[in-house]
């Protein structure tokens, strides 16, 4: 559910003034799902930058993509009586418990990128992964001119990002009858795996025209495989907005990228967490916009 | 009277026939010796008898009833126990726990609980019986090899015995423990237990066995009554030739000083030790188990760090920091425990024999395989090591042949000073003599030999001089006429010291 | 110092030191609630590590615990969603774990295959089965009555901690006091000799892997209840943590040597490190480096082998 | 059948079977370009597995290879970005790998610590150092002259494949033909026996871990060049693949037994499985299950120990 009355946009969020006396005692915990991916590193950088700017203390905890570890970490944050918790859950279902615990301890929770299904989240800042999948599909359809063979590189099976992007992509691509998805293979959101997997897929399907990679790391790996094969005119669309990918799009190496704005999500997360700590009101949900990056779009990645 | 009979037993390993028609009968209350060269098939026969191996042909009868022992459990149930030639203990468990495994039912309490108190008492009694003065809680890994052998014996004694097989139980024991063992055997005999006794120490057989069966190349040569047979005949039946002069000591003038220990100490040798070995001399060290003989060997060869005193090699003061250094300086050690220290068990004969001398047959770091093969074949032949092929894993060699392999790998290094720790353990009469000849040959070439042995006739028969150790100290030195069993025994027992 | 080595106090020393440092540097560490949290957070790994100790003592290894955890949890969760009572579903999950372990055990004991590669194979296989079964989706909406297992407390102490303590006590008694335990050590010391002594080594091996599988399933139930969700990716990489706890606790990967007390200490060291790094607000990029150093220091304190020669 | 066991043909049989099945089911498998791709894709794991074979033969293990790979690559990449020539940077990276290995080796050999836990510690430590050094960001914009290492071809065969073949031949010669190789096997067979036979076991252990570290760095350079990027997460989990290749190839984790030929076959089996799953477009949900099954079947074909008793 987006589009509720409380929804606002990242860009329109008002900036807070830093350095008030009370902010000095504010401590914020940030539990990030993983730092195994530039996307989350950028998010974490955003959090730290903003915390520094506002003069609040922040603890960043890396959950290594394991919900149980994250649950432990949120418990540790509660132990430290932090003023607010920013949570980027590894999984939407299972971190509900963690949020419930924070609720019980009366510590406000802001979720980034993904939310939780249960529990009281004060603010949810994210872009929509189903939507991202749809946008990527639209781009790919455009890129291959509505017909031909395409390939989907999947993320880690069992993650919501994977499932949602696949869902969006499938819904949209089905509408274009000229296009067949000839292969769907996982490369676990990982660049070097994508390089090998794409190389293999190219062996099996020499005539493909397009690739949808569920994140930029895989898109970049796939691009390497395509370059190495000497093939041209295979269009690659990715998701995330990583600097390297964006610049590849600008140079025409990659067709398009559906960019998210993790740094801004991090920045905004801290802003709202601080507000919450001070007892101020924040919007219940913030729609972090997806930016379509095409060859001529001016956009800087993270 | 019960009776255990093996008829027409045959057994081969991957096509190589080891036992070809063996007939063998033991009766309750007799000590029946089994004699044969290294590799004749004695151990294999016993393993076949106890169900560890399955015979390819033949039958086993207990009191005339054919038996099928599929596993060792079956033979155990029938009242047959075996003390293996190779120690079969769990080094990671305590003595008492080693006595527990295999006899759990006797100590199983409620819910499978081990009745430790009872186990301890039982263990203490058994240890006393075999004469081992160690706490039952001692981990076996802390025991010396002789002590381990005593634990093995204790283990076999605890079951309801009808027949007991002892495969070279005294190889690692000194005279004292051996006497103790004989008492135990005599005791079992009166209880009607039949004993199969394997040993290469002929004097033992004559001391306590009733009958002997000679095995040769996997076939029974004959069974003799020990009171009625001469040693020479037995040896001839066993090796196929007569062996005269069992201890062929050669006379030579000792030359320059080779090794000089001047009050050396190590962590395990608190009392300063002094001894000398000259070129062209075979010097012995005797003593009871635990006297510290092995520790002296370890100190000399750079295994244990020397913490006090001075060691000189050819007049030069030297301390080795590792065995490698000792070896490079011409000092080699034949270790007493072939299984743990001497051989890479799962590796082939060739690999094992070549290991200490690899650097002598290499070019630019590459092993010259052809030369290596020739070299190994030569040594296998010289020591008559019985192998099926050169890459046969040594674990599959008979015990005596393993010992010869350890000996060969160090002889091949041709060291200036060779330290031997129980070098002929489990080696048959014929092969022993060959080893003695090789020692004499070294002596003639002005090398020095320091030999630790628990085989008293060997020690007194082969050495020019013998040091006696007790309680980690040298308590005497025997030369010339003093080299006599009785003098030795008094020193060892510490009743009266012939002080230097 | 031989008693020090004899009773393997190295790991304990490491833990004590770690706890001491944290007590001094962090105000929150020594609060009851934090210590209970550490215990709670350690429980899943401790359960796996207890099972792993059995396996490693026989000189085996079980890489499949994480996948067994995920697979059995997914089935149990699905059954609960389908209306089967948590008790029944839980017991069924334990059976699944036992079966998975039996599969490993049979291949190791009877087919004489190397434990590492067998359990690597089943690790991948069970993970795959979980993915297929769950369609890659988490299973949620579990009955409320299942909540207590992971989140309840008895006398103020979390249920998973109770479970771990009980399992530990039973396992400890079995390993150190019973005939079966001695046999397991014997097999690890020398399987051939154990066989010659009449120990039915193969059966024991199967049982040992079953213990590991059952405890993996139990850990899975705890985890699932704590998260109120069964995830297809659950337990990923947990085998390494469990092995680490065991080895950190002084158990030899060669088998036959080690204690469960050591394992628990090992698991606690890992739990305390994680907790401490979080409490002290060590920057996340520095956490791995610090954790690696702490592990290295902890084993330095247990230089058992140093006198080996 | 003894020659079958003697020459350890089990793994080879597994590979041949796998290749046969793929040849029949997939039209593309037996094309030259696909086979070259498989070789190329296997090269990184093969390099790691060759080093791992040295370590495992001494009855050790090196869990740190993935992190060493990442750390040395990150440094090399940064140096190249800073203008240092790829050759220099590459050699420096190999030295870093050697140093990392030496650190492991010294702790294993001289401090007598268990290899598993030592290299687990350094695995975590090196990963942490990489994260700190790179700030969690990939390093790209590497010089074009560095491209050839991973992407070039000589006589139509990719450079990484050449590198792997050369490394393999050297390593194979060392292990099977030289004095040093013999000693490595001897150490693995029984370190004490080797030591008593005059082998300077400690030095050899250090060297062996250095070999593993250097090859990890080399693999890192290849990977970095292929991707034209050094990633802080590079090599994550690669240790498991390398160990799997070694064990699948018939080398015993207890040391002293195994061959490099087996290792290469093991690495190829893994590479072929991945390639095959992609070619056949096996659903991602089924991939793990299939892969697990294939591994299990492959080892069943190598039931070497079956006559063990
Ligand atoms: N498992 C096996 N595989 C192959 N050959 C074997 C095996 N066990 C024994 N042998 C061979 O069988 C022969 C007889 O060995 P056995 O151990 O029975 O001799 P032994 O009479 O006990 O000799 P020793 O006096 O040296 O102990 C030897 O040549 C040995 O190499
Ligand atoms: N504490 C110990 N730890 C390890 N090994 C030991 C220990 N004490 C003794 N040993 C080893 O046990 C073996 C037997 O030692 P022991 O004290 O019995 O000396 P010995 O006089 O050589 O006895 P033996 O007559 O049995 O040869 C030696 O190899 C010795 O190094
Ligand atoms: O949204 C994030 C990023 O796209 C990342 O690349 C993979 O995980 C997803 O959850
Ligand atoms: Mg024998
Ligand atoms: Mg001795």
Image: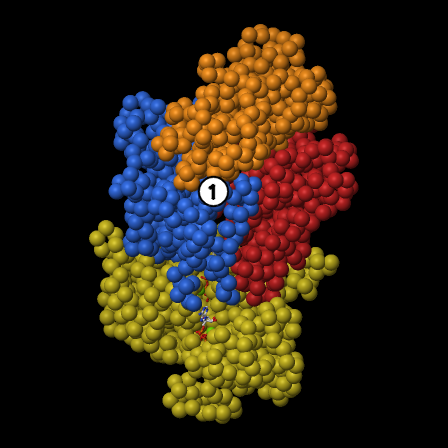
Chain colours: A orange, B yellow, C blue, D red
Give the left or right position of residue A72, taking residue C176 as reference: right
Q: Position of residue B288 (x, y in %)?
A: 42, 79
Q: Is residue C44 visible?
A: yes
Viewer-proximal residue, D309 or D69? D69
Residue farthest left in this picture: B110
Location of mark 1 (residue): C278
Q: Position of residue C27 (x, y in %)?
A: 42, 48
Residue at mark 1: chain = C
Give the left or right position of residue B116, taking residue B271 as reference: left
Q: Is residue A109 visible?
A: no
| Mark 1 Cα-neighbour bin, 10 Å: few <14, some 14–19, many ≥20 | many
Judge whether B369 appears above or below B413 on screen.
above
Viewer-proximal residue, D260 or B172? D260
Judge whether C10 appears above or below A81 on screen.
below
- Residue at figure coordinates x 46%, y 14% from the top left: A4
- Residue at figure coordinates x 55%, y 22% from the top left: A14
Viewer-proximal residue, A290 or B135? A290
Q: Position of residue A69 (x, y in %)?
A: 44, 37
Q: Secondary structure at mark 1?
A: helix
- Residue at figure coordinates x 70%, y 56% from the top left: B366
Judge whether D214 appears above or below D156 on screen.
below
């Amino acid at each position: 559910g987006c589009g509720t009355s409380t929804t606002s946009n990242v860009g329109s969020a008002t900036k807070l003034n830093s350095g008030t006396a009370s902010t000095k005692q504010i401590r914020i915990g940030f539990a990030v799902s993983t730092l195994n991916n530039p996307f989350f590193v950028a998010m974490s950088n955003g959090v730290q930058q903003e915390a520094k700017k506002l003069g609040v203390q922040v603890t960043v905890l890396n959950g290594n993509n394991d919900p149980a570890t994250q649950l432990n970490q949120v418990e540790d944050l509660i132990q430290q009586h932090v003023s607010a918790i920013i949570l980027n859950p590894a999984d939407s279902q299972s971190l509900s418990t963690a949020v419930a615990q924070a609720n019980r301890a009366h510590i406000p929770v802001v979720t980034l990128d993904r939310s939780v299904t249960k529990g009281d989240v004060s603010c949810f800042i994210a872009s929509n992964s189903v939507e991202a999948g749809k946008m990527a599909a639209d781009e790919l359809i455009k890129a291959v001119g509505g017909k031909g063979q395409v390939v989907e590189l999947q993320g880690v099976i069992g993650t919501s990002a994977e499932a949602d992007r696949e869902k969006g992509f499938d819904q949209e691509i089905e509408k274009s009858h000229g296009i067949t998805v000839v292969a769907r293979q996982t490369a676990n959101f990982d660049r070097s795996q994508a390089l090998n997997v794409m190389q293999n897929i190219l062996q099996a399907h020499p005539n493909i025209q397009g690739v949808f990679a569920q994140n930029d790391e895989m898109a970049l790996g796939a691009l390497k495989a395509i370059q190495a094969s000497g093939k041209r005119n295979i269009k690659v669309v990715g998701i995330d907005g990583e600097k390297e990918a964006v610049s590849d799009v600008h140079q025409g190496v990659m067709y398009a990228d559906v960019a998210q704005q993790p740094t801004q999500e991090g920045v905004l997360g801290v802003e709202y967490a601080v507000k919450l700590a001070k007892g101020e009101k924040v919007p219940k949900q913030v729609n972090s916009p997806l930016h379509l990056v095409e060859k001529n779009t001016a956009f800087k990645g993270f | 009277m019960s009776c255990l009979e093996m008829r027409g037993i045959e057994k081969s390993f991957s096509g190589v026939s080891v036992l070809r028609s063996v007939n063998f009968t033991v009766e309750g209350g007799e000590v029946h010796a089994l004699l044969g060269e290294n590799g004749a098939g004695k151990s294999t026969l016993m393993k076949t008898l106890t169900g560890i191996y399955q015979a390819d042909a033949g039958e086993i009868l207990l009191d005339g009833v054919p038996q099928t022992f599929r596993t060792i459990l079956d033979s155990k149930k029938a009242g047959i126990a075996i003390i293996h030639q190779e120690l079969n203990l769990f080094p990671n468990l305590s003595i008492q726990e080693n006595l527990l495994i295999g006899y759990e039912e006797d100590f199983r309490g409620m819910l499978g609980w081990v009745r430790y108190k009872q186990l301890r008492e039982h263990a203490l009694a058994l240890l006393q019986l075999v004469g081992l003065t160690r706490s039952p809680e001692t981990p076996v890994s802390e025991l010396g090899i002789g002590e381990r052998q005593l634990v093995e014996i204790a283990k076999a004694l605890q079951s309801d015995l009808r027949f007991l097989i002892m495969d070279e139980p005294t190889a690692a024991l000194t005279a004292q423990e051996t006497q103790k063992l004989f008492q135990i055997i005599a005791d079992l005999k009166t209880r009607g237990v039949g004993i199969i006794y394997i040993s290469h120490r002929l004097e033992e057989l004559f001391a306590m066995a009733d009958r002997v069966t000679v095995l040769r190349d996997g076939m029974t040569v004959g069974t003799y009554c020990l009171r009625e047979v001469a040693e020479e005949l037995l040896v001839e039946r066993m090796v196929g030739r007569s062996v005269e002069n069992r201890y062929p000591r050669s006379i030579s003038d000792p030359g320059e000083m080779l090794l000089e220990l001047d009050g050396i100490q190590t962590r395990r040798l608190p009392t300063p030790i002094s001894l000398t070995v000259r070129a062209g001399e075979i010097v012995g060290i005797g003593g009871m188990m635990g006297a510290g003989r092995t520790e002296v060997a370890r100190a000399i060869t750079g295994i244990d760090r020397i913490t006090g005193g001075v060691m000189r090699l050819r007049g030069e003061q030297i301390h080795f920091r590792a065995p490698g250094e000792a070896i490079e300086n011409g000092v080699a050690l034949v270790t007493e425990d072939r299984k743990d220290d001497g051989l890479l068990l799962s590796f082939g004969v060739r690999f094992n024999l070549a290991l200490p001398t690899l650097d002598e047959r290499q070019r630019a770091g590459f092993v010259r395989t052809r030369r290596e093969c020739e070299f190994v074949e030569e040594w296998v032949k010289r020591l008559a090591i019985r192998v099926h092929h050169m890459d046969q894993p040594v674990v599959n060699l008979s015990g005596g042949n393993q010992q010869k392999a350890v000996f060969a790998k160090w002889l091949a290094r041709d060291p200036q000073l060779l330290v031997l720790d129980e070098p002929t353990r489990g080696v048959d009469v014929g092969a022993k003599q060959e080893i003695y000849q090789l020692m004499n040959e070294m002596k003639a070439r002005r090398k020095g030999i320091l030999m630790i042995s628990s085989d008293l006739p060997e020690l007194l028969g082969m050495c020019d001089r013998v040091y006696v150790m007790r309680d980690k100290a040298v308590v005497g030195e025997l030369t010339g006429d003093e080299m006599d069993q009785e003098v030795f025994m008094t020193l060892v027992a510490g009743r009266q010291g012939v002080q230097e | 110092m031989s008693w020090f080595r004899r009773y393997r106090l190295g790991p304990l020393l490491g833990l004590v030191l770690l706890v001491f440092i944290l007590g001094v540097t962090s105000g929150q560490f020594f609060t009851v609630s934090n210590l209970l949290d550490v215990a709670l957070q350690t429980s899943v790994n401790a359960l796996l590590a207890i099972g792993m100790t059995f396996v490693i003592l026989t000189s085996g290894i079980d890489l499949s615990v994480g996948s067994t955890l995920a697979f059995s949890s997914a089935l149990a969760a699905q059954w609960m969603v389908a209306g089967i009572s948590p008790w029944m579903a839980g017991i069924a999950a334990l059976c699944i774990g036992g079966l998975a372990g039996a599969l490993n055990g049979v291949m190791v004991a009877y087919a004489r295959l190397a434990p590492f590669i067998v359990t690597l194979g089943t690790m991948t296989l069970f993970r795959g089965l979980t993915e297929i079964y769950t369609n890659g989706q988490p299973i949620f909406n579990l009955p409320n009555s299942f909540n207590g297992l992971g989140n309840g407390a008895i006398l103020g102490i979390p249920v998973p901690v109770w479970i771990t303590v009980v399992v530990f006590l039973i396992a400890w008694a079995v390993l150190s006091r019973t005939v079966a335990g001695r046999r397991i050590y014997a097999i690890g010391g020398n399987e051939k000799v154990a066989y010659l002594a009449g120990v039915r080594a193969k059966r024991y091996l199967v049982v040992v892997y079953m213990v590991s599988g059952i405890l993996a399933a139990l850990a899975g139930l705890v985890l699932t209840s704590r998260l109120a969700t069964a995830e297809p990716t659950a337990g990923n990489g947990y085998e390494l943590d469990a092995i680490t706890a065991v080895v950190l606790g002084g158990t030899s990967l060669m088998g036959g040597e080690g204690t469960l007390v050591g394992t628990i200490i090992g698991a606690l060291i890992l739990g305390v490190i994680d907790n401490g790094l979080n409490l002290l607000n060590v920057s996340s990029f520095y956490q791995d480096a610090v954790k690696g150093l702490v592990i290295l220091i902890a084993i330095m304190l247990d230089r058992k082998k140093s006198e080996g020669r």
